[in-house]
Structures are given as C-alpha cells and as structure tokens.
C-alpha cells in the first residue's frame, strides 16, 4: 500500500476539505463528500497516491428547491392566486 490523499481546494488554492488521508492498497474506492458548507462554484480536487499526483477541476452546483403554492382568493372573482416560496 501507499499513502493516499484526496483534498478539495477552492479556486484561490485554499484547502476546503480532506476526504482521504490514509494508507490504501491498490483498488477502487468511493468517498462521500459532504459539501453542505460550501457555495456553488468551481473547485479543484487533488489525488496523491505514492508518486502519482493528479489535480482536476469540478463544478459544485447547489440546487435550490422551489415550492409553488396555489391559494384560492376569497375575493368575489374567485380567481386563483399564485405565490412562490423559495427554500435554500
């Protein structure tokens, strides 16, 4: 095995997360990345395994959820009114 590190950086080069920092044997691995504290934008991730180093770009898109609520108006015309609430 060898030392494996997987780190995430913002575009200014600041480290924002370390996802892996341990000895690993050769193989395929998956890592969960909780990005709830990060803003949408461009980030870089750097994978280091022994003498191998690779840096790649990724785009984080945090989707806003929309709720559309239709309410009956109590006015004489009885028309539906639409109000839009956005939750982040």
Image: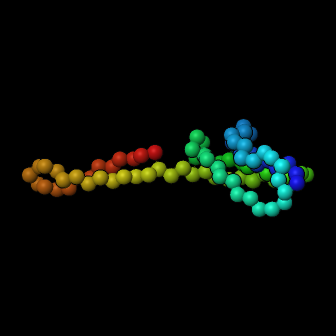
Residue 48 visible, this orientation: no
Could you tell me residue 5's position as x and y percent? Answer: 80, 47
For the point 58% across and 40% down, the residue is 37
Could you tell me residue 55's position as x and y percent? Answer: 78, 51
Which residue sits furthest bottom? 28
Residue 4 visible, this orientation: yes
Could you tell me residue 64's position as x and y percent? Answer: 47, 50
For the point 46% across and 45% down, the residue is 88
- Tell me which corner region of the image, top left, top right, bottom left or bottom right, holds residue 27: bottom right
For the point 71% across and 52% down, the residue is 57
For the point 61% across and 51% down, the residue is 60
How many marks on residues?
Answer: 0
Q: Quadrant of the N terminus?
A: bottom right
Could you tell me residue 12's position as x and y percent? Answer: 71, 39
Which residue sits furthest right? 51
The chosen color scheme is: rainbow
- Tell me which corner region of the image, top left, top right, bottom left or bottom right, holds residue 21: top right
Q: Is residue 37 left or right of residue 21?
A: left
């Amino acid at each position: 095995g060898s030392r494996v590190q997987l780190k995430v950086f913002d575009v200014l080069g600041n480290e924002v997360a370390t996802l892996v920092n341990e000895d690993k044997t050769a193989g395929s691995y998956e890592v969960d990345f909780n990005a709830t504290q990060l803003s949408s934008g461009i980030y870089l991730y750097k994978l280091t395994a022994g003498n191998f180093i690779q840096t790649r770009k990724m785009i984080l898109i945090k989707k806003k959820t929309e709720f559309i609520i239709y309410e009956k108006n109590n006015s004489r015309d009885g028309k539906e009114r639409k109000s839009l609430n956005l939750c982040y």
